[in-house]
Image: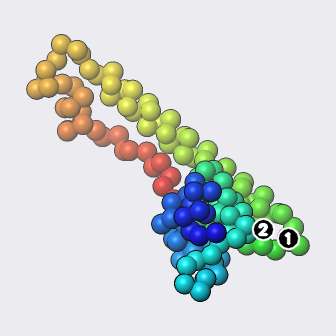
């Protein structure tokens, strides 16, 4: 199948497929006589695996490790469990940070008095001068 068909079948953008090839997550496809990339079911299966991992917010490095483990089925799955446990820890930390962010935003929103004008708006004042609270680290990885 050509790259457009793989993109449509997988719900993945053509540019993303090429990127995954370039960084080595997706194996290089065969080339037809007219030099078009030719993909097969292995590419589609691997791309589906990558997309499922991305939907779980896994990093490309985490996916690379999982793909390596998947490509070597004789290995014990302890590495998979370890990776998932670490990922769960990242998710828990992000939830904590997002909850702190929500609390800050609700506090800020609570400062509004509908009769205020923007010149006396407590929210705008707090954003411009007061905001002594640090923005939570949302765990961008």
At label 2, counting other C-alpha atoms closer than 10 Å, the crowd grade (few under 14, some 14-19, many 20 or more) is some
Using residue 80 as the reference point, say whether residue 74 is left or right of it.
Answer: right
Q: Residue at x 52, y 71 (%)?
A: 18
* Residue 72 position in % (x across, y down): 81, 74
Q: Residue 107 — which label?
A: none
> Does 63 sit above or below residue 129?
below
Residue 38 in sight in this render: yes
Which SS class for mark 2?
helix
User: Marks 1 and 2, Cα distance to the nearest angstrom?
Assistant: 6 Å
Pointer 1 and pointer 2: residues touching (CB < 8 Å)? yes
Q: Residue at x 37, y 31 (%)?
A: 105
The one of 133 and 9 positioned closer to us in this rendering: 9
> Does 71 sit above or below residue 114?
below
* Residue 3 position in % (x across, y down): 56, 68
**Residue that sits furthest to the front in the current view:** 34
Which SS class for mark 1?
loop
* Residue 12 position in % (x across, y down): 55, 58
At label 1, counting other C-alpha atoms closer than 10 Å, the crowd grade (few under 14, some 14-19, many 20 or more) is few
Q: Residue at x 64, y 81 (%)?
A: 30
The one of 9 and 75 positioned closer to us in this rendering: 9
Quarter holding the N terminus is bottom right
The one of 112 and 130 positioned closer to us in this rendering: 112
Q: Residue at x 73, y 72 (%)?
A: 68
Q: Choose top left, top right, bottom left or bottom right for residue 64.
A: bottom right
**Residue that sits furthest to the bottom in the current view:** 33
Which colour assignment does the render follow?
A: rainbow
Q: Choose top left, top right, bottom left or bottom right for residue 122.
A: top left
> Does 130 sit above or below residue 41?
above
Residue wearing tag 2: 70
Residue wearing tag 1: 73
């Amino acid at each position: 199948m050509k790259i457009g068909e793989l993109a449509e079948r997988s719900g993945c953008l053509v540019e993303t497929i090429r990127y995954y090839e370039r960084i080595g997550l997706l194996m290089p496809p065969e080339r037809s006589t007219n030099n078009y990339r030719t993909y097969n079911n292995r590419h589609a299966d691997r791309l589906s695996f990558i997309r499922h991992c991305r939907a779980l917010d896994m990093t490309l490095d985490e996916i690379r490790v999982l793909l390596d483990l998947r490509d070597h089925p004789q290995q014990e799955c302890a590495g998979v469990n370890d990776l998932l446990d670490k990922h769960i820890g990242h998710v828990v930390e992000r939830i904590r940070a997002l909850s702190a962010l929500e609390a800050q935003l609700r506090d800020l929103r609570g400062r509004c008095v509908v009769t205020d004008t923007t010149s006396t708006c407590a929210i705008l004042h707090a954003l411009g001068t007061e905001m002594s609270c640090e923005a939570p680290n949302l765990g961008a990885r």
